[in-house]
Image (cartoon, rainbow, N blue to C red):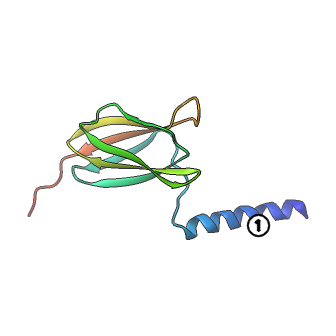
């Protein structure tokens, strides 16, 4: 009886997270492609601190979603590549995000 309750609890938790629009945190090593001016948001779970190798390629910020989850918001600034780390490796494991920014298409 106890074992059958576990899937029900997991299903309820999943349904609750979907109802609030939150996705599961991304894996470390996630690759993101952006165009200049484009913004993407990733759930990075619990993250304390943010550092990007090249802040001229992307504008990045962490924003809290809940006490246990944060979102990494990044906007392409110029073509290039960079790596951002959300969280600290010794505290939360951190999430590395590899970001590639392409030029924006020319206006029609």
Q: Residue at x 54, y 51 (%)?
A: 69
Q: Residue at x 37, y 35 (%)?
A: 83
Q: Residue furthest bottom?
A: 19
The C terminus lies in which quarter of the figure? bottom left
Percent coordinates x, y for residue 22 in the rendering: 52, 61
Q: What crowding class fits label 1: few (fewer than 14 Cα within 10 Å), some (14-19), or many (20 or more)?
A: few
Taking the image as shown, residue 8 lies to the left or right of residue 16, namely: right
Task: Classify 26 as above or below 89.
Answer: below
Using the image as rendered, state which of residue 69 and residue 84 is in the foreground: 69
Q: Residue furthest right?
A: 1
Percent coordinates x, y for residue 14 in the rendering: 64, 63
Using the image as rendered, state which of residue 62 and residue 58 is in the foreground: 62
Percent coordinates x, y for residue 105 in the rendering: 15, 55
Task: Classify 19 as above or below 82.
Answer: below
Q: Secondary structure at mark 1?
A: helix
The residue to which callout 1 is attached is 8
Taking the image as shown, residue 90 lies to the left or right of residue 34, namely: right
């Amino acid at each position: 009886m106890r074992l059958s309750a576990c899937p029900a609890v997991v299903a309820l938790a999943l349904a609750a997270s979907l109802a609030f629009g939150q996705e599961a945190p991304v894996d470390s090593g996630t690759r993101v492609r952006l165009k200049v001016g484009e913004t993407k948001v990733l759930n990075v779970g619990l993250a304390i601190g943010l550092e990007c190798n090249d802040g001229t390629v992307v504008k990045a910020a962490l924003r809290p979603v809940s006490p246990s989850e944060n979102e990494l918001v990044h906007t392409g600034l110029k073509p290039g590549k960079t790596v951002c780390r959300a969280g600290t490796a010794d505290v939360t494991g951190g999430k590395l995000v590899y970001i590639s920014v392409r030029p924006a298409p020319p206006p029609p």
